[in-house]
Image (cartoon, helix red, strand yellow):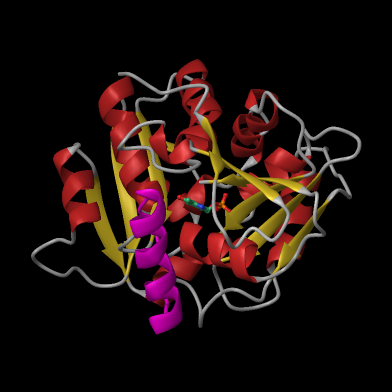
Amino acid sequence: MDLRLPSPLERLDDERLGGIEVFLKRDDLIHPDFPGNKWRKLKYNLRAAREQNHTTLLTFGGAYSNHLRATAAAGHHFGFATIGIVRGEQHTPLNPILARATALGMTLAYVDRATYREKTEETLRERYGDFYLIPEGGANAYALEGCAEIPAEIDRGFDVLCCSSGTGATLAGVATALGPHQRAIGFSALKGDFLAADVRRLQSACGRTSENWSVDNRFHFGGFAKRDATLTAFVDDFEARHGIALDPVYEGKMMYAILTGRLFPAGTTVVALL
Ligand SMILES: *Cc1c(COP(=O)(O)O)cnc(C)c1O
């Protein structure tokens, strides 16, 4: 399997920059089955699963979870069986993400929302036997370790590292590895005010707390996977200008914030993690 690492760093040339410099860190190009940060978050989980002699990976996600598909791909490429616990009811035909996960060998099990919330490891072990458990979104200490490798790949100076956030694991991880005058901002793809607490919890869990990050909850466009005509037009226009199809769930919201939000003083160098 070919992973494009280090992922490319590209300067963005756009008339809306307003005096800031923006570079795109193209983690979306690492591998088609591991878009965005999905490889970063799985890397050390796979090593741990192997070292602990597990043969099966089990994880969780919604029906459109790229993390489920990435875990299926990891199992396929690295020789683990995979089980995906999907929130909600089964719909046929399967959507492209679940269809791909199935094609990569993942066994899917659907649970209603209440059961999903209560999913306990014990019940799952009774049902599925031994497995290595990866939390929803891959968000654990191993994920932070993988994401902490991103800043060192950026071979030029920068002030701010921006990422789009779901669980906050990527933000938590990159923040542990920045230089003394750098900071990270996570743009939440979800509506609500819980991301900062989640990031703090994730950092504490691996004993690497830092104060060099913040979250911006203003650009969720109505909530997870929600969008409006403004975001759709922004993403379409971005593709026409730059030939890059931003995913509207995460990347589109972050780039909208960076290019229209007037968030940084002129002269700031920003790296946006795709
Ligand atoms: C999965 C994904 C995220 C969410 O990352 P977290 O570590 O859960 O915050 C953000 N951006 C992109 C492009 C993703 O694919």
Q: Residue at x 38, y 74 (%)?
A: 233
The picture quadrant where one finds residue 29 is top left
The x, y position of residue 156, in whole percent, is 71, 27
- Could one spot residue 270 in this view of the protein? yes
In the rendered image of this protein, does residue 150 appear above or below residue 254? above
Picture residue at 51% right of the left edge, 83% below the top: 222
Is residue 139 found left or right of 68 in the rendered image? right
Residue 206 pos. (x, y %):
76, 38
> Taking the image as drawn, is residue 225 in sight?
no
Main SS, magenta region, reads helix
**Image label count:** 0
Is residue 165 placed above or below 228 in the rendered structure?
A: above
Q: Is residue 209 left or right of residue 154?
A: right
Vertical order, 47 against 105 (above or below): above
Q: Position of residue 238 (x, y in %)?
A: 42, 60
Question: Which residue reaches farthest left?
Answer: 93
Most foreground residue, 41 or 274: 274
Quadrant that contains the N terminus:
top left
Q: Is residue 127 left or right of residue 268?
A: left
Q: Quadrant of residue 149?
A: top right
Q: Residue at x 76, y 42 (%)?
A: 175
Residue 184 image position (x, y, % from top left): 75, 49
Q: Can residue 73 be found in the magenta stretch?
A: no
The residues colored magenta run: 226-248
Query: Is 271 rendered above or below residue 96?
Result: above
Q: Residue at x 80, y 49 (%)?
A: 267
